[in-house]
Image (tube, rainbow, N blue to C red):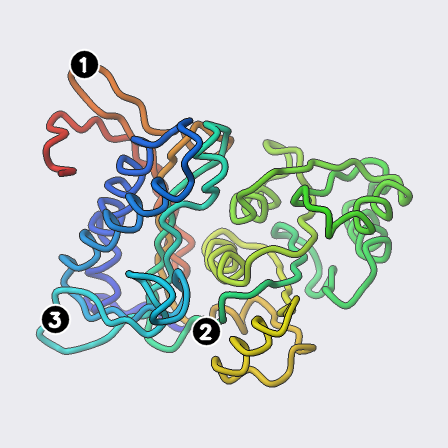
Amino acid sequence: MSEAVEGTELDRALALDIVRVTEATAVAAAQWLGRGDEASADAAAAAAMHREVARLPFEGVVVVGEGEEGDCPVFYLGEKIGAGSPSGAALDLAVDPIEGSTLCAKALPNAMSVLVVAERGSLLKVPPIYMEKVAVGPGYPEGIVRVAATPTENLNALAKAKGVRVQDLTVCVLDRPRHGYLIEEIRTAGAALRLIGDGDIAGVIHVTNPSQTGIDMYLGIGGAAEGVLAAAALACIGGQMEGRLVALNKEHRAWAKLAGITDLTKTYGLEDMVAGDLSFAATGITDGSMMAGVHHSPATITTESVVMRASTHTRRWIRTDHADPRKFD
């Protein structure tokens, strides 16, 4: 991880500005909370985030976004956005206006808005395909889990490192048909399962504090973009993660080729996905284990957020009462 330098473009971007972006995004998404309309929630959140990022004093380049240019109206890969800076320095942006669109549409826990701002060239550029992931929290020997290992091998290695039985471990997995084999092997090995319907960024973050979340390991296939965003969070908090890109069809392979990825068998470690300093910001949309969601009262809108820095491992938890909702218009 590179040294942080006070007064850099990244430092200015790391202030409360990026939290204000995720706050505005979460408030926009929350207007569609529980309405069963994922598309409208996504569109509202993306528009709000795009509007707020465009006001920030830097030159940002989207490296993890909503899709390829022409496939989405905003936050396409390579889009340049921001109000500019005197030095002309550019920063990498990784965005997920709604992490857990289904969670928002159904008013289920752990939907949140996420923005990562990083030193230029420090984030892995991934196409809009999938990634197989394995993650654990901090404090274990390096390489304790590997994406190339079987679930049973990873469980045995983690149990040995923790000094517990496999039966004492809990694994978080996205509840998807493609994970039928994975679920069966985890249960056969004796570990408990925490199945989640959506939101694998939160799922990965949960492994960093198993005493609070009850989750020791994250396993399975989810979005590649979410993999990089989760890696950014682990770079700030601590932990280990490996990922391997997964192309499920011809279209995915074409996207990978466009992104310059020729080896879909390559394993990416945490430092491959996040090579420099960064700031990670998230605001809750629905109530969750990390943060409360957006709450309205007659006088205020209340949000809860976290902003983290990789180089210093600083984490700030922010509860904000917004007395003037018009600022989100």
Which residue sits at x=69%, y=77%? Answer: 265
Q: Which of 269 and 299 is in front in this view?
A: 299
Mark 1 vs 2, N-terminal side = 2
Specify the label residue 85 is tagged with: 3
- Label 1 amino acid? Pro
Mark 3 vs 2, N-terminal side = 3
Circle nearer the viewer, 3 or 1: 1
Q: Name the residue under label 1.
A: 298
5 relative to 267 in the view: left or right: left
- Label 2 amino acid? Lys
Where is residue 186 drawn, in percent x and y? 83, 45
Which residue sits at x=65%, y=55%? Answer: 135
Where 166 falls versus 50 (above or below)? above
Where is residue 280 drawn, in percent x and y? 38, 54
User: The residue tagged with tag 1: helix, strand or loop?
Assistant: loop
Where is residue 192 drawn, in percent x and y? 79, 36
30 relative to 264 in the view: left or right: left
User: The residue tagged with tag 2: helix, strand or loop?
Assistant: loop
Q: Residues within 10 Å of mark 3 (few under 14, many from 20)?
A: few
Quadrant assignment, res 284: top left
Specify the label residue 125 is tagged with: 2
- Label 3 amino acid? Ser
Give the CA distance from mark 3 to mark 1. 39 Å
Circle nearer the viewer, 3 or 2: 2
Where is residue 41 drawn, in percent x and y? 35, 40
Q: Which residue lies furthest to the top in this view?
A: 298
Where 125 falls versus 288 (above or below)? below
Which residue sits at x=39%, y=44%? Answer: 39
- The total of numbered circles placed on residues is 3
Disc 3 vs disc 2: Cβ atoms closer than 8 Å? Answer: no
Quadrant assignment, res 245: bottom right
Which residue sits at x=68%, y=37%? Answer: 195
